[in-house]
Image: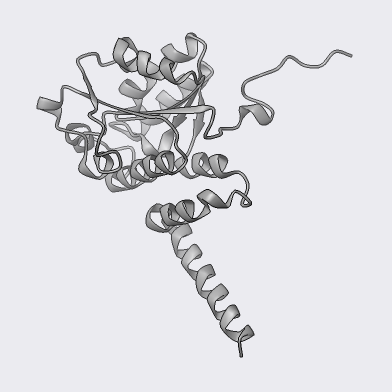
Amino acid sequence: MSSPPASPHRGLDALLTPQNTVLVLIDHQPFQFANLHSHEPTMVLNNVIGLAKGAKAFNVPTILTTVLEERGGYLVKGLQDVFPEQKPIDRTFINTWEDSRVVDAVKKTGRKKLLLAALWTEICLAMPAIQAAGEGFEVYVVTDASGGVSAEAHDMAVRRMQMAGVTPITWMAVISEWQRDWAREASVAALASIIGDHGGGSSVAYAWEMQLLAAGRANQGR
């Protein structure tokens, strides 16, 4: 019996690594946050900053882009502060993938696993995700670092993208795949710091674990 055909959605090669991923963060600007209703806005902000910090810690190429920043506002400060030296590519195209500067920056990395997060999901995330998937990229969308004008708009967009072969994922799943092995000690401290600052309940659990470990070491020293 012949083996099933290889799929970009199955097997070890379907997982993200720091060496095979390029990240594009799209339109995390004040205007878009003002009409974000699929998620609590501060949670999306927390998540996209955590994702950006993860990309920086793991040396994943990251491209920032805005749309009509003079009217929609500059990239939110917490996100820009992660990459202070990078000027976001400011577009007129609603669909990021129609801006050749963004596409050229992605292609220059030589990577085919394209990770996207955007405001809003149904427009600025769906359009480039669907187009890039049709052009041969393996597209992953970070759903909790993105958001739409309503829960329905966000959910329908994710369904539509899945029909086009796009893979949904969450930000902590992304950084966990990049780490993959706790023996990779060079990135463990940075990962722990990011989870501590942005991990919500996981950060509380992590702090508790650190307390228990410290107490155990203290008891061993008696």
- 31 vs 35, nearest the viewer: 31
- Residue 160 screen position, x and y as percent: 45, 19
Q: Quadrant of the N terminus?
A: top right
- Residue 27 screen position, x and y as percent: 26, 29
The residue drawn where x is 41% and y is 56% is 200
> In this image, 9 relative to 51: left or right?
right
Q: Residue furthest right?
A: 1
158 up-or-down from 57: above or below: above
172 up-or-down from 124: above or below: below
The residue drawn where x is 44% and y is 54% is 195
110 up-or-down from 183: above or below: above
Residue 127 visible somewhere in the drawing: no
> In this image, 140 relative to 75: left or right?
right
Displayed quadrant of residue 130: top left
Displayed quadrant of residue 171: top left
> In this image, 66 relative to 113: left or right?
left
> In this image, 15 relative to 204: left or right?
right
Counting labels gives 0
- 174 vs 178, nearest the viewer: 178
Residue 14 visible somewhere in the drawing: yes
The residue drawn where x is 45% and y is 52% is 190
Q: Quadrant of the C terminus?
A: bottom right
Q: Residue furthest bottom?
A: 222
Q: Residue furthest left?
A: 70
- Residue 18 screen position, x and y as percent: 52, 35
- Residue 189 screen position, x and y as percent: 48, 56
217 up-or-down from 205: above or below: below
The residue drawn where x is 57% and y is 52% is 185
